[in-house]
Image: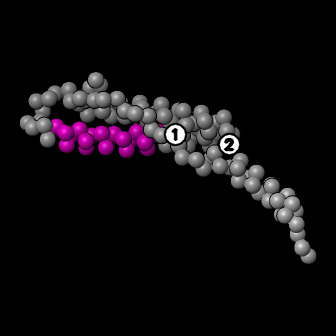
Amino acid sequence: MCYSWSRTVSIMDPILLLMLATLPACAPAASTPPEKAFVLADPAKYKTEAERARAQQLVEADCKVKALAASAALDKTVASERNSIENISKAREKGAEMYTTAFTHCMLSNGYVSK
């Protein structure tokens, strides 16, 4: 039996529509918002500029990890409440807010102030 191209396309239509419908759910979360610039509240805490720079890099890396974890947890919770496109976009928005808040809190609690 020989199938025509139009027959193959019509069979594939529901599969393609299903794949396109699920694509937004597989998309990565929105990119992380840029962090504010932070400076050490007590510059005398470190003797050299290299020590200050290293300490800030360590704190920023730690705070980014904590902020991403908090953001992902909130994003997952909101998105799982109802599986709809509106809820997924709301989850990403709330996740971005959580990232910013968690990062800022972490930096402030580690002795840095916002510029």
Q: The residue under label 1 is which amino acid type?
A: Ala
Quadrant where the C terminus sits is top left
Pick whichever, 13 or 54, lies toward us. Answer: 13
- Residue 1 locus on image (x, y percent): 91, 76
- Residue 49 locus on image (x, y percent): 13, 37
4 left or right of 85 in image? right
Q: The residue under label 2 is which amino acid type?
A: Asn
Q: Which residue is mark 1?
A: 30
Q: Main secondary structure of the magenta part?
A: helix
Question: Where, by quadrant of the figure, is residue 24 drawn?
Answer: top right
Q: Which residue is mark 2?
A: 83
12 left or right of 32 in image? right
Pick whichever, 103 or 54, lies toward us. Answer: 54
Residue 57 in the magenta stretch? The answer is yes
Q: Which mark is residue 56?
A: none
Q: CA distance from mark 2 to mark 1?
A: 18 Å
Could you classify mark 2 by the number of other residues whose Cα lies within 10 Å: few (under 14), some (14-19), or many (20 or more)? few
- Residue 100 locus on image (x, y percent): 42, 32
User: Where does the magenta region start and end?
Assistant: 52-71
Pick whichever, 81 or 33, lies toward us. Answer: 33
- Residue 20 locus on image (x, y percent): 70, 50
Look at 63% across and 47% down and name the residue there.
25
Residue most toward the left?
Answer: 47
